[in-house]
């Protein structure tokens, strides 16, 4: 055991589940969180020519970058390996070739330095990301919107999530990316579409409103995607292109707000009279129109609203380090036999018993 006070935990986080190689050092002390370093090496340039992430290219790029990224995170933080209390690495869900690179690096450091390993669910990282910069206590209602996931979750505490709703087809970020592609925008499409939408009129094109009136909290973006693709074929001017981008962004934001509103009603009923907190996280939470729509909805329902700092919405390792520190504080560590999991739902029971996606060959999707 280290001679530092155990009320202070310093954890190295490693993230390699998609197209960023990331490492960060986070210190948790007396309830406060300090990000000592956060390094994100993006592979966007490697994948851009293919219009999306190529798993084999991603895995190789992680292998090439991982050592330098971890070294830079340690150096920027000004701590050496003896100054760490644990190593947290993403163990899934994600592209398994990449996950294995970061998880193996984490295991190697843990083994060499006699440190506990914490195998982190990438989605749990997004779930805690708001706590890197905001004082948001558990429990809270979470909308997790990224490139691979679109879910409403009741986050009751560390590792305790109940799924209230999920997408029945695409994730919100996937919808942004695919529609951006039909508008001729480069990968990743979400941020590019947000920029294009700046000079556009969101009411210029009527777009379908999915699942309106449905009592559950699920999402669907396939109708919007098809409608946008048809309209994109007939665009006649740059202004129309901007208008369509604004309309698509508005439609996605509206659906996210409408489905969140349903979940807030259910959640508020469950928690009658107690504090109500709403959090949005994941890459799509970086979108200003989405944030605005959700904040308005949350306030109208009597919820406080919080979102991560912009740099912690998209994939990063600070959120993985914080998830690791929170688990470590509760004694929740993993063995060196922890496996990389391509699929790993946060609420495993809901994914198994009530799948919105049919389970694939590798088990329940998120
Ligand atoms: O959380 P993230 O970095 O990776 C996953 O875990 O999937 O999310 C990436 C997704 C991509 O689909 C990207 O287009 C979307 O988040 N995204 C945005 C914005 N920034 C990132 N979508 C809309 N507006 C943005 N500003
Ligand atoms: Zn992510």
Image (cartoon, grey):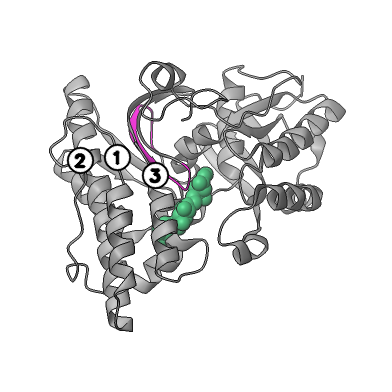
Nearer-N-terminus badge (3/1): 3
Which residue is tagged 2?
211
The residue singled out by tag 1 in the image is: 219
Look at the image and give the residue range highlighted in magenta.
136-148
Q: Is residue 110 visible?
A: yes
- The residue nearer to you, when weighing 234 against 204, is 234
Answer yes or no: do the residues labelled 2 and 1 have beta carbons within 8 Å? yes
Residue shown at the point (44%, 57%) measured from the top left: 177
Q: Residue at x 72, y 54 (%)?
A: 76
State whether residue 295 appears in this view. Answer: no
Q: Which residue is mark 3?
A: 170
Whole-angstrom CA distance, mark 2 to mark 1, is 7 Å
Mark 2 lies on a secondary structure that is loop
- Quarter of the image for residue 321 reads top right
Task: Judge left or right: residue 268 versus residue 314.
Answer: left
Q: Is residue 29 above or below residue 363?
A: below
Among numbered discs 3 and 2, the one appearing first in the sequence: 3
Mark 3 vs mark 2, CA separation in Å:
14 Å
Q: Residues within 10 Å of mark 2 (few under 14, many from 20)?
A: some
Residue 66 percent location from the top left of the image = 77, 48
- Choose top left, top right, bottom left or bottom right for residue 273: top left
Magenta-colored stretch includes residue 285: no
Crowding at mark 1 (Cα within 10 Å: few <14, some 14-19, many 20+)? many
Looking at the picture, how far across and down is residue 116, in whole percent? 73, 23
């Amino acid at each position: 055991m280290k001679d530092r006070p155990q009320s202070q935990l310093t954890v190295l986080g490693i993230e390699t589940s998609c197209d960023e190689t990331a490492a960060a050092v986070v210190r948790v002390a007396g309830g406060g969180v300090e990000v000592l370093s956060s390094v994100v090496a993006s592979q966007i340039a490697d994948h851009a020519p293919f219009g999306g992430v190529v798993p084999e290219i991603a895995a190789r790029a992680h292998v090439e970058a991982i050592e330098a990224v971890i070294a830079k995170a340690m150096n920027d933080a000004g701590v050496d390996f003896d100054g760490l209390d644990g190593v947290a690495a993403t163990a899934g869900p994600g592209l398994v070739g990449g996950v294995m690179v970061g998880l193996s690096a984490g295991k190697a450091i843990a083994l060499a330095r006699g440190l506990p390993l914490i195998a982190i669910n990438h989605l749990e990282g997004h779930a805690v990301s708001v706590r890197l910069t905001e004082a948001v206590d558990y429990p809270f209602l979470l909308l997790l919107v990224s490139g691979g996931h679109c879910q409403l979750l009741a986050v009751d505490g560390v590792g305790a999530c109940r799924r209230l709703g999920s997408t029945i087809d695409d994730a919100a970020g996937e919808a942004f990316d695919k529609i951006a592609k039909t508008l001729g925008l480069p990968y990743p499409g979400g941020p590019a579409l947000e920029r294009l939408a700046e000079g556009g009129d969101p009411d210029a094109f009527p777009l379908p409103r999915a699942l309106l009136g449905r009592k559950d909290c699920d999402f669907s973006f396939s109708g919007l995607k098809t409608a946008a693709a048809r309209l994109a074929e007939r665009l006649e001017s740059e202004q129309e292109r901007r208008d369509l981008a604004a309309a698509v962004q508005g439609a996605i934001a509206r659906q996210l707000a409408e489905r969140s509103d349903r979940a807030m009603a259910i959640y508020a009923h469950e928690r009658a009279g107690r504090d109500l907190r709403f959090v949005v996280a994941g890459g799509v939470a970086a979108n200003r129109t989405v944030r605005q729509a959700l904040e308005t909805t949350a306030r109208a329902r009597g919820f406080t609203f919080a979102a991560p700092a912009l740099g912690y919405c998209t994939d990063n390792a600070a959120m993985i380090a914080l998830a690791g520190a929170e688990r470590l504080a509760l004694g929740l560590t993993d063995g060196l036999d922890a496996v990389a999991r391509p699929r790993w739902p946060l609420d495993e029971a809901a994914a198994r018993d009530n799948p919105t996606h049919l389970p694939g060959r590798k088990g329940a999707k998120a």
